[in-house]
Amino acid sequence: MTYSLNFISVELALVLGALLILMAAVFGAGRKTLGFAALATVMIAIFRLPATMPPGYPVFDGMLVSDTFGYGMRLFILLTVAMVVLMSLAYAWPQDEDMGEFYFFILVATVALNLAACAGNLAMVYLAVETLSIVSYVLAGYFKRDILSTEAGVKYFLFGALSTGLMLYGISLAYGLFGTLDMSFIGSRIAAGDAHGPALVVAAVLILAGLAFKASLVPFHMWVADVYEGAPWPVAAFLSVTSKALGFVLLARIFFSNAVVAVPFWSGVAPVIAILTMTIGNLAAFHQNSVKRMLAFSSVAQAGYIFAAMALGQAGLSTAFFYIAIYAFMNMGAFAAAAFLSPADAQLEAYRGLGRRAPVMAFLFSVFLLSLAGLPPLAGFMAKFFVISAAVEARDYILAGAVVLNSILGFFYYLKVIKAMYFDDETSVRECLVPWLGYLLVGGCAWGVIFLAIHPQAILDILALMFV
Amino acid sequence: MISLGHFVALSTVLFCIGLFGVLTQRNAIRFLISIELILNAANINLVAFNRYLAPASAEGQVVSLFVIGVAAAASVVGLILIISIYRQRQSVFLDDFNLLKW
């Protein structure tokens, strides 16, 4: 019990910080104070993390597992949430919005994410995913007087409630098949060949549906553009990086437990989903007139590349998480730079001429876009290169070809934004003021994108520890 | 004599009704009710499997209690969002939520 409490002390610190922030907001603390308090809470959680380093006992009777994978993912989640909080601090929020609840919800979502990342039981998976979802619905609809934000919240809710409902039904079927919800037990039963044909496939498909929604895989990607467009920029960044990564973490946890790709249909279905996701994401991004919607569909396409690595089975798992780590830097950077360049209006016209009015930020935005596209010296290229070489090694030439073709397709719409910033005449002369915190965040992401291109080994070493 | 098969049949029918409702209903409230049907189908599964297949532990029953609680919380948030959009648009029909293109 003491061990279990020590293990979740990170999450307890987050809950405590969240409650304090909520109380501080009630007593009228300012936006900056609340934001820095949230940042401090996440920092405390990060520094607390090494103390919970796993000796590997089951936590709370196996509800959580303490393994290096969960440990690494908790660190990843806390770091990306710290970036989201930084972005919220620097972002130009509308004057009449209260910020106390915002940071409260972000921290509560972090707790749910952390618990999901080390879930050892399907009941825990459901509870954590549902907690995260409920909080995310509110965050997407955070501007309650804004007609677009409310619509985004409603759409996210309707899609999200359906997909978690499907996942829960799949979990209940798995319970019927194995008589337990413990994932390691289920994994060993499947490894022993105890799987029961069609019922197991139905359960797996339903669980996959719930996770595909979080990871925005086709055909559960329809909400992405609408929700990102209506939601505040920092929330869109949170959904596209942290929440999406969680979908992949749980896919790895559930479908790759005990070193078996748990269900026989994986190798048939997964590559198809991967190819559809990247192609549909890229084609839809192509004709978007809003930079936010374009980035939303680009994040769908990126999810396709990540899932392509996962579709290769155990061999591609660490490649997928290498991609996720790099994707976090470049996508967070792109969302942050886009938000700082034009906080209120995400239409492409609003970005015209920003290369002259905000040269530093526009340059960094271009770096992130080129990295997302996969231009050779940048980290995004390394990530794509590893996916392609993993696919070639597995002799899956169709998948490798699809990734190559899609990467080329992606260049066109990323370059469209860069062209608008540098070569088009401006339609407005709006000042572009970015606080120093904004430069700190975007600069940090840019450093990550460039540093990881030169030293991908830094991430690979950590991944080698995570997948032992 | 009521067997496990009856319970599973009931839950499957309930799940299919819920799924049918989700796919056909254009009213946000009906959509929400259909989702509740899916959740309750899962609950019946959990409780029935617990009773017939693993009676030694109460895992399924406990999880179903959690599901009821979480579903209530989700419905609250969902209804708040639906009320909020109703105040802005005077409508709860999904086809009217068209400012963001689907």
Image: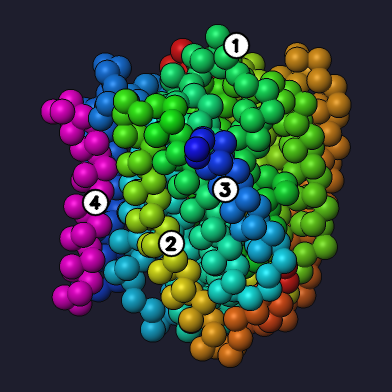
Percent across and percent down for residue A50 are 26, 28
Q: What element carries label 4?
A: helix
Closer to the chain start, of discs 3 and 2, is 3
The residue to which callout 1 is attached is A193
**At 33% across and 71% down in the image, what residue appears?**
A99
Chain containing the residue with disc 1: A
The residue carrying mark 2 is B74
Disc 3 + disc 1, Cβ < 8 Å: no
- Which chain hosts label 2? B
Check residue A15 in the rendering and tell me which mark sits there, or answer none.
4
The structure residue drawn at horizontal position 65% and vertical position 79%, both measured from the top left corner, is: B93
Gap in Å between the C-alphas at discs 3 and 2?
24 Å
| Whole-percent x, y for residue A289 in the image | 76, 69
Q: In the rendered view, tell whether residue A161 sits above or below residue A378.
A: below
Q: Is residue A40 above or below residue A33?
A: above
Tag 1 secondary structure: loop
